[in-house]
Amino acid sequence: MPQPGTPTTTVLVVEDEPLINQAVGDRMRAEGHTVVSAYDGPGAVAAFQEHRPDLVVLDVMLPGFDGLEVCRRIQQQRPVPVLMLTARDDEADVLVGLGVGADDYLTKPFRMRELVARVAALLRRVERAQQLVRESAERPQGVLELGALRIDAGARRTWLHGEELHLTPTEFDLLGALAAVPGQVRTRERLLADVWGWDGGAGATRTVDSHVKALRAKIGPERVRTVHGVGYALETR
Ligand code: CA
């Protein structure tokens, strides 16, 4: 249960399988969150508008319209952290490539403990991002120029050859983590910790790979160097 005086977090759980929906909802309640449930695409968008959740757990395959469409529609209204539930491991690659704005992925079947850890990490990330915004409002931050790439950390904006890029929040955080040490390799584990806020187990680094792929598609594949078996580095040219 939350401490007295601590504002509770509202989690929207979108899943058409009643047993999973119920189980996830129960566990989120046990963690002290307020839970709103939806069972199809249109219901999810309506619940999002009505309850203004702080985080969304979103199944991909849904009646009405699917989780990708739900993600697009709600992110257009207000940026919100989204944890997507996928049926297959390789689906995360496809989803990240589509750039619908989900922040993390969990493959079914998953352990409740894993879900709780991911939700907690996403919420910590939002808190940290809000803190960074507050801090950057207090002291103006510099603009970083790396070859044709221009990154304004304070405003969270990026340009390539003078043209503004539209990066998702996760892509921006990933670019920021790499740009913090230009030319130097960042391990995938370190990126997981810095960008996603969790130290994942086996298979967790796939999240990093998927988002690097999406980032490369926007800033140019040659700008992010792969150091095989280790991690990634941002080229300084
Ligand atoms: Ca489903």
Image: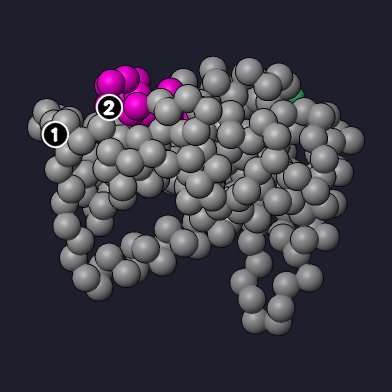
Q: In which quarter of the image is residue 29?
A: bottom right
Which residue is situated farthest in the bottom direction here? Answer: 4
Check disc 2 and report its element: helix, strand or loop: helix
Camera-side residue of 75 and 96: 96
The picture places residue 113, in percent across and down from the top left corner, at 80, 48
What residue appears at the point 13 percent right and 34 percent down from the top-left corner? 147
Three-letter code, disc 1: Gly
Distance between the alpha carbons at the discs numbered 2 and 1: 10 Å
The picture places residue 151, in percent across and down from the top left corner, at 21, 44
Residue at mark 2: 223
Instruction: Tell me the magenta residue range.
Output: 211-225
Taking the image as shown, residue 102 lies to the left or right of residue 83, namely left
Which of the numbered marks, if any, corresponds to residue 224?
none
Check disc 1 and report its element: helix, strand or loop: loop
Camera-side residue of 116 and 147: 147
What residue appears at the point 17 percent right and 57 percent down from the top-left corner? 142
Relative height, residue 156 to residue 21 (above, below): below
For the N terminus, which image quadrant? bottom right
Prevalent SS, magenta region: helix
Residue at mark 1: 147
- Whether residue 221 is in magenta: the answer is yes
The picture places residue 72, in percent across and down from the top left corner, at 48, 30
The reply to whether callout 2 and callout 1 are in contact (CB within 8 Å) is yes
Taking the image as shown, residue 21 lies to the left or right of residue 49, namely right
Three-letter code, disc 2: Arg
What residue appears at the point 65 percent right and 55 percent down from the top-left corner? 120
The answer to whether residue 149 of the structure is visible from this angle is no
